[in-house]
Amino acid sequence: MTQLRRMLPSSNALFVFEAAARCGSFTRAAAELNVTQPAVSRMLGRLESHLGVRLFDRSAAGIVLTEDGRSLYRRIAEGFRGIEAAIREIEARRTGTETVTLSLSTAFTTHWLMPRINRLQKEFPSVDLRFQLIAGPLQGPVDDVDLGMRFVDGGDARHETSLVMREIMLPICSPAYIERRKATGDGNTIINLAGSDPGWPDSFEDLRDDRAGPRSTLSFSDYAIVVQAALLGQGIALGWATVSSHWLGTGALVPAARSLMRTGRLCQLVHSRARPMRTAVAEIRDWIIAQSRSDIEALDGLYPGLGIGAAAF
């Protein structure tokens, strides 16, 4: 360690370099570290001068790690993750509570996890759950979390995956919406997720020929609001089974068509191989998967004609 101290202009340079490399931007690294962008630039310039190599290629388009930069970042990231794991172990022994961080969509968290959060906490009383919530498309790295729900084909050299279910969707609405529409004879109201295909109702025969009147639409940028609008009887939404299975099981939502939409995508729980798979993380992963499969089995019993189980697994 004495030699390492001589090899660096300061130990803080490691934290600044790691943040810049991970963020891909001096400006974003500065915001994360609560310093100015020029301070980050100066610190990294001193580090490069001290090492005698360029760690970043700089251009008007941004920064990119050089080969030397990638090598240093890989080792620093591994070291930081090991230090973080050790600190977590110390904290868990001191407090009796272990922290598990999940990267999930706001929709899944709101409509699937929250209704059963008491059950989860009772099952894992010594786990402190933290969330990285994603309002838009379910994507992004999982390096800084224990588990992330993503739509990926499978594991790779950097990630291991566990299948939650295959991606299936079906039109959903509240029973009150069906009764109101029968009474009024109005056309359907379609609740859309902004940016998705607005023509999805035409994929379902039950929604294709709406003789009662023209369709109206509502559009929201957050899928959690799409499902909430359907729960409140505002119209028919395209329901991802991963998100809507709880409400379909309780009867708060019902299928609005007699068929499903299948895609080739797989909903997976993703874990970075660079982070040790702690027992608590593995147990929560298995709990989420088991609960999701239990939901689908229940829906198979409620709506056997849809074939939800066969499509999901």
Image (cartoon, rainbow, N blue to C red):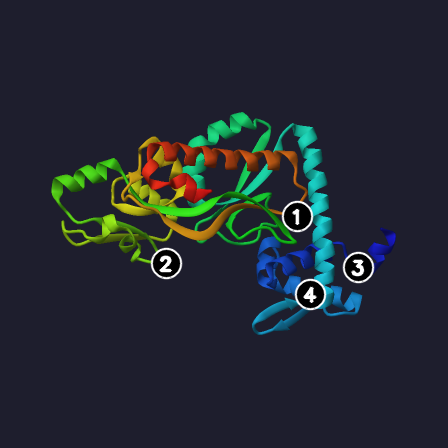
Earlier-in-chain disc, 2 versus 4: 4
Q: Position of residue 26 (x, y in %)?
A: 61, 63
Earlier-in-chain disc, 3 versus 2: 3
Q: Residue at x 29, y 58 (%)?
A: 199
Residue lying furthest bottom: 60
Earlier-in-chain disc, 1 versus 4: 4
Task: Identify the residue under disc 4.
Answer: 42
Task: Identify the residue under disc 3.
Answer: 8
Label 2 – label 4 distance at C-alpha: 41 Å
Label 1 – label 2 distance at C-alpha: 33 Å
- Label at residue 273: 1
Q: Secondary structure at mark 1?
A: loop
Whether residue 94 sits left or right of residue 266 in the image: it is right
Q: Secondary structure at mark 4?
A: helix
Label 3 – label 4 distance at C-alpha: 14 Å
For the residue marked with disc 3, what is the amino acid? Leu
Label 3 – label 2 distance at C-alpha: 48 Å
